[in-house]
Amino acid sequence: MKAYRLTSWQHDGEFAEVPQPDPGPGEVLLRIGAAGACHSDLHLMHDFTEGVLPWGPPFTLGHENAGWVEALGPGVRGLEVGEPVAVYGPWGCGRCHRCRTGAENYCVHQQALPYAGGGLGADGGMASHMLVPDARWLVGLGDLDPVEAAPLTDAGLTPYHAVKRSLPVLLPGSTALVIGVGGLGHMAVQILRALTAARIVAIDERPDALALATSLGADVTIPADEDAAAAVMDATGGVGVDVALDMVGSDTTLALAAAVTRSLGHLTIVGLGGGTLPLSFFGVAYEASVATTYWGTLPELVEVVELARAGRLRAEVHRFGLDEAPDAYRRMQEGALSGRAVIVP
Ligand code: FEH
Ligand code: ZN
Ligand code: ZN
């Protein structure tokens, strides 16, 4: 089968013919409906070098996957051939206390594993078929279409986890700020609207992204320019925001988040933009918490799928054929896409 693969670090993806896998004991073969194209893939192609991560190329790209069960390996129970499923992305050891709670994104043995997941060291979904080494990583989609649902597994799950961890400060009367309304940001707005009573402020450089944020439930939209911090303070009556979700993670966006997060607030770095935030006593408001997050837990993916099935979460999907994968990444890099690009093999 034809696959879009990372063949070496600091190298664009390449097409190659690879054997269609057969599922062994405990494994499941999927027919891929769609594989989302993620900004992190651009970092895999352009920024990471040998030794930065405990795994490496060659592997098939695509870590945001959904499809239909094609074949079950010996011993697999609870799944039917033809069933639509989403693939939980961060594959942990399955045996440590964190994996046992479903938090495989924070597996204790992460550094010792030969991959972080399909499309991250193991073969991912940018091909007609994908082998999933353990059926536990598959979540039933019910009546959802895998092509539309693939972004739920990363663009949905990642902001869902980031919002959920901040629910204690997202009380009625609070304000949540989403910096960057791209693949993850447009999902963050919907998740905030679904899970909280917070006022939602969205910031982006692109008018069409701000319009999308408004249509998805943002209460205030602010252009990402030199007046953005003042506009956020103005929009919050001078007090700042309770939660700032930086979906970009650049020097500029981190500085903006630090300037507007109020005392006792949460500044959460979700984007891999490579920016840094000098942290000092007076660098952020008193007792403001700064954290990164990485993806989400397996139970949270079940919750995200239920949110989508309830019609409360839907990715703005832009479909590309497998042969168009390089175009999808190019347009994403140019910031020419609002919503999420998915590769439909
Ligand atoms: C992928 C690889 C490394 C860090 C973060 C990611 C995210 O895109 C996963 O959601
Ligand atoms: Zn990703
Ligand atoms: Zn583990």
Image (cartoon, helix red, strand yellow):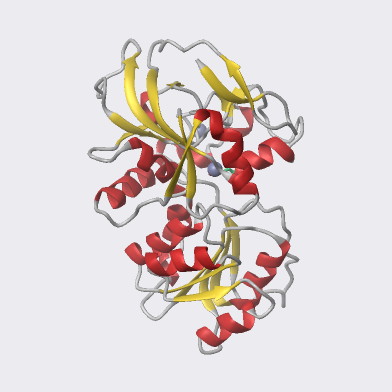
Position of the C terminus by quadrant: top left
State whether residue 39 appears in this view: yes
Residue found 50% across the figure and 46% down from its top: 295
Residue found 61% across the figure and 25% down from its top: 5
The foreground one among 271 and 19 is: 19
The foreground one among 222 and 92 is: 222
Q: Is residue 9 left or right of residue 24?
A: right
Residue 276, relative to residue 152: is it above or below? below
Q: Where is residue 60 in the image (x, y as percent from the top left)?
A: 57, 25
Image quarter of residue 53: top right
Q: Is residue 197 left or right of residue 36?
A: left
Residue found 42% across the figure and 36% down from its top: 88
Residue 134, relative to residue 104: is it above or below? above
Image quarter of residue 299: top left
Q: Is residue 82 left or right of residue 116?
A: left
Q: Where is residue 120 in the image (x, y as percent from the top left)?
A: 58, 31
Residue 275, relative to residue 91: is it above or below? below
Residue 23, relative to residue 166: is it above or below? above
Image quarter of residue 28: top left
State whether residue 285 appears in this view: no
The foreground one among 47 and 137 is: 47
Q: How many labels does the image show?
A: 0
The foreground one among 219 and 23 is: 219
Q: Where is residue 229 in the image (x, y as percent from the top left)?
A: 63, 79
Q: Position of residue 237 (x, y in %)?
A: 51, 89
Q: Give the quarter the ligand 1 occupies.
A: top right
